[in-house]
């Protein structure tokens, strides 16, 4: 594989903009894509706001900020990725959309370009099945907020070459991340373990004996967690969390310990998705 210099990122939402931020910050030319220009600009504004806070706190110089700003480019055209060394897909959690994107990349990018997906639940092997050169597809699952959280799961699909895995590991380290390699199993490592963290909290809430804030407080004070399950679901997005739970439930043939919660489903249907809609399990100001 050629040395990675140019990164393409699909999706300017919470995860995509976070990945773009850490990529540009570490000196990589970063191309951020979304289907509408306003979505890309919202993502760019979110990134710039985070960097400005670092300048205000004296953790970044204005000269450094200018250099980083020069590293990031916005686009609404997939053709802009033709010279990328790696593309990280952080689009909506929809298998067919991901497969379609990878198939389109194959006609645009060089044979050496690595196709990485930030999926939190879909099979890397299934996503790779849509293209001819399946060896180039790898899972690179970042954690929210992607510009802060150190852990990254590198998922080895059935077709993924060891060379691509090695490149993904070294690239992750250059981003300041701590990579862990795992097999292409449902929900990989963290999300599989986390189903109980969220699921049990939701079961307790459904019994209507303890409220959200009390459950979160107990988990933080007695369990030593930085955030409680409901705070974390609001941060991630209740729709995203619910989607992952449904995917894991299906993947494990409706094993009851992964069963989705009616509480989450009702909230998604009502548009109460957490921080991004200013209301989830908690209310937020602008």
Image (cartoon, rainbow, N blue to C red):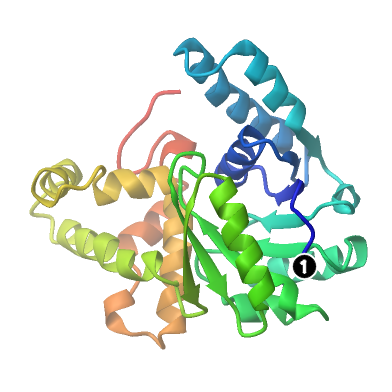
Closer to us: 60 or 13: 60
Residue at 71%, 40% (x, y): give it. 28
x, y (%) of residue 34?
Answer: 74, 45
Q: Is residue 5 above or below residue 199?
A: above
Closer to us: 73 or 101: 73
The N terminus: image quadrant: bottom right
x, y (%) of residue 91?
Answer: 65, 55
Q: Is residue 86 above or below residue 284?
A: below
Q: Relative to residue 197, is residue 157 drawn left or right? A: right
x, y (%) of residue 146?
Answer: 50, 45
Tag 1 secondary structure: helix
Q: Is residue 218 visible?
A: yes
Closer to us: 254 or 272: 254
Task: From the image, tell me which residue sits under label 1.
Answer: 102
Residue at 81%, 78% (x, y): give it. 133
Q: Relative to residue 182, is residue 28 drawn left or right? A: right
Q: Relative to residue 156, is residue 213 drawn left or right? A: left
Residue sitting farthest toward the bottom: 253
Q: Is residue 118 visible?
A: no
Label count reads 1
Residue at 72%, 30% (x, y): give it. 41
């Amino acid at each position: 594989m050629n040395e990675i210099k140019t990164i393409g990122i699909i999706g300017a939402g919470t995860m995509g903009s976070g990945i773009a931020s850490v990529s540009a910050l570490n000196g990589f030319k970063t191309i951020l894509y979304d289907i509408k220009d306003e979505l890309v600009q919202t993502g760019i504004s979110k990134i710039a706001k985070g960097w400005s806070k670092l300048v205000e706190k004296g953790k970044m110089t204005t000269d450094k900020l200018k250099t980083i700003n020069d590293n990031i480019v916005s686009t609404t055209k997939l053709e802009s990725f033709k010279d990328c060394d790696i593309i990280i897909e952080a689009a909506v959690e929809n298998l067919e959309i991901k497969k379609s994107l990878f198939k389109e990349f194959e006609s645009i990018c060089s044979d050496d370009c690595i196709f990485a997906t930030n999926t939190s639940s879909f099979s890397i092997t299934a996503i790779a099945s849509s293209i001819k050169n399946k060896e180039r597809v790898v899972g690179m699952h970042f954690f929210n907020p992607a510009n802060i959280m150190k852990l990254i799961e590198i998922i080895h699909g059935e077709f993924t070459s060891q060379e691509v895995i090695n490149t993904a590991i070294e690239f992750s380290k250059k981003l300041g991340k701590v990579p862990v390699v795992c097999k292409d199993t449902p929900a990989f490592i963290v999300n599989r373990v986390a189903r109980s963290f969220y699921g049990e909290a939701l079961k307790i809430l459904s019994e209507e004996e303890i409220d959200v804030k009390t459950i979160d407080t107990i988990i933080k004070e007695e369990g030593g967690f930085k955030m409680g399950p409901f705070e974390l679901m609001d941060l991630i997005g209740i729709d995203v969390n619910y989607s992952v739970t449904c995917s894991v439930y299906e993947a494990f043939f409706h094993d009851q310990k992964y069963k989705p919660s009616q509480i989450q489903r009702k909230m998604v249907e009502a548009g109460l998705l957490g921080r991004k809609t200013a209301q989830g399990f908690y209310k937020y100001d602008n």
